[in-house]
Image (cartoon, rainbow, N blue to C red):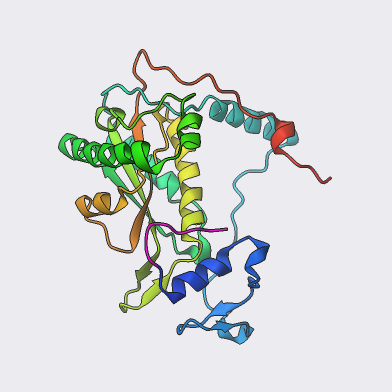
């Protein structure tokens, strides 16, 4: 079930989140439509299916089975080398590389093609220091008061603390915002369907692009720091921080936890 924790929702947002849930206990058919006043309308006439131009799909690749196997295996092996790295060098990453990574994230699918994301790229050292200060202050409270013993015990294998030096050492920070809604050219409020899922998918593409570029990152969830980050980055009130990614090169002495991934048999349920 989708859960929005970072803001107080009005009736429209509550209803929309319920519609978008994949939890059968929500008891709300996905075909139902939310009217502007918050009512549910399951009449298909509420939609205009004729709007929107379509163009022919241009298939650029037609691989043989052998080529598909080779390319899919190669991509898997590249992604399997991906690790969450917390030890960075301060070696600069060319901005054009970061721009291509952002472009890749922007190719993700989104509910009703609303593209509900903003990627704030921070390379200014003073601002990186400020972001680190904000996050470490909140993380200290998280570790000491908000996070329970079980959570803290689960983190012992990773060896994390509230201190995040990599946030100011890395070349670039990317702060990912999900846009809960926006406004169209007429100033009318525009609903962003599946905004959290859509933005999360874009982050998956971003992680792959970072790995493909030979860089490293660590998915960081700046719990309770979102409002302050939004303020210093000058973002709108309807944009909520989803994740933060430090991006750069691993330091020469970088280490990672000795984790193993689940096997294919553990994660794939085949119905052939």
Q: Residue at x 31, y 31 (%)?
A: 164
The stretch of residues the image draws in magenta is 1-8
Q: How many marks?
A: 0
Which quadrant is the N terminus positioned in? bottom right
Q: Residue at x 42, y 37 (%)?
A: 219
Which quadrant is the C terminus positioned in? top right
Q: Find residue 67 and report its image quarter.
A: top right
Q: Residue at x 51, y 66 (%)?
A: 17
Magenta span includes 161: no
Which of 139/56 is in front?
A: 139
Q: Find residue 269 and report its image quarter.
A: top right
Which of 27/216 is in front?
A: 27
110 over 264 or under it: above or below: below
Instruction: Locate residue 234, reporting x and y percent.
Output: 21, 55
Instruction: Locate residue 22, reporting x and y percent.
Output: 62, 60
Which of 19/90 is in front?
A: 19
Magenta span includes 2: yes
241 over 208 or under it: above or below: below
């Amino acid at each position: 079930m989708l859960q929005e924790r970072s803001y107080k929702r009005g009736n429209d947002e509550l209803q929309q989140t319920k519609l978008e849930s994949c939890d059968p206990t929500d008891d709300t058919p996905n075909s139902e439509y939310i009217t502007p006043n918050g009512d549910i309308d399951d009449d298909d006439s509420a939609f205009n299916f004729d709007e929107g131009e379509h163009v022919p799909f241009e298939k650029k690749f037609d691989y043989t089975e052998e080529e598909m196997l080779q390319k899919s295996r190669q991509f898997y092996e590249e992604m399997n080398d991906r690790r969450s790295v917390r030890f960075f060098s301060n070696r600069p990453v060319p901005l054009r590389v970061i721009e291509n990574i952002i472009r890749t994230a922007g190719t993700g699918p989104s509910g009703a093609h609303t593209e509900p994301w903003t990627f704030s790229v921070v390379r200014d050292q003073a601002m990186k220091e400020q972001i680190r200060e904000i996050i470490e202050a909140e993380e200290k409270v998280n570790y000491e008061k908000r996070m329970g013993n079980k959570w803290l015990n689960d983190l012992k294998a990773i060896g994390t603390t509230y201190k995040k030096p990599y946030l100011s050492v890395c070349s670039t920070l990317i702060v990912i915002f999900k846009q809960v809604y926006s406004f169209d050219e007429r100033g009318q409020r525009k609903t962003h369907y599946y905004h959290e899922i859509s933005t999360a998918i874009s982050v998956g593409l971003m992680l792959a692009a970072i790995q493909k570029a030979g860089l490293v990152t660590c998915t960081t969830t700046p719990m309770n720091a979102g409002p302050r980050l939004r303020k210093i980055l000058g973002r709108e009130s309807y944009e909520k921080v989803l994740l933060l990614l430090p991006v750069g090169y691993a330091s020469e002495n970088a280490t990672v936890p000795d984790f193993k991934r689940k096997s294919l048999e553990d994660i794939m349920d085949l119905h052939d």
